[in-house]
Image (spheres, rainbow, N blue to C red):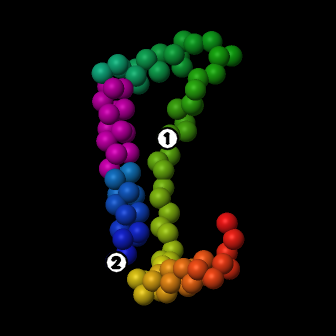
């Protein structure tokens, strides 16, 4: 396991949970405000030239999370080597800021 992939996995899982809670809250509000019946009345009696926001034939499509490819990140040893190499370049003045 890698700390970066663990962090991203946790963020993705949290996003899914929050999205589910949001959708549940929206459905709760729709029930309390009689959203569906109001919408059907508007569709039935509203002026046909006035478009509604979203036609009822197009349901909301949920977000899909695409899995990330398993990318290998440098291990501790490789990172330490890179850090030592960059320090060496800076110490000899190879990089000029």
Q: Position of residue 57 (x, y in %)?
A: 55, 36
Q: Position of residue 93 (x, y in %)?
A: 66, 78
Q: Residue furthest front?
A: 92
Mark found first going from the N terminus, 2 or 1: 2
Residue wearing tag 2: 1
SS under mark 2? loop
Q: Is residue 22 magenta?
A: yes
- In the image, 3 versus 61, the foreground residue is 3
- Give the Cα distance between marks 2 and 1: 36 Å
Q: How many marks?
A: 2
> Which stretch appears magenta?
17-31
Question: What residue do we see at 35% from left, 19% from top?
Answer: 33
- In the image, 50 versus 7, the foreground residue is 7
Pointer 2 with pointer 1, Cβ within 8 A: no
Question: What residue do we see at 34% from left, 78% from top?
Answer: 1
Left or right placement of residue 62 versus residue 34 in this view: right
Compared with residue 66, is residue 92 higher up or lower down, i.e. above or below? below
User: Mostly what secondary structure, the magenta segment?
Assistant: helix
Q: Which mark is residue 60?
A: 1
Q: Position of residue 89 (x, y in %)?
A: 61, 82
Left or right placement of residue 4 versus residue 44 in this view: left
Circle 2: is it few (<14), some (14-19), or many (20+) Cα within 10 Å? few
Circle 1: is it few (<14), some (14-19), or many (20+) Cα within 10 Å? few
Residue 72 shows in the view: no
- In the image, 53 versus 58, the foreground residue is 53
Question: What residue do we see at 47% from left, 48% from top?
Answer: 62
């Amino acid at each position: 396991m890698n700390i970066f992939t663990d962090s991203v996995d946790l963020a993705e899982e949290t996003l899914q949970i929050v999205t589910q809670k949001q959708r549940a809250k929206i459905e709760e509000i729709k029930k309390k405000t009689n959203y569906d019946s109001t919408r059907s009345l508007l569709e039935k009696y509203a002026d046909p030239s006035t478009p509604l926001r979203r036609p009822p034939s197009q349901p909301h499509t949920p977000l899909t999370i695409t899995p990330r490819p398993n990318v290998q990140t440098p291990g501790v040893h490789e990172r330490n080597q890179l850090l030592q190499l960059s320090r060496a370049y800076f110490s000899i003045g190879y990089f000029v800021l």
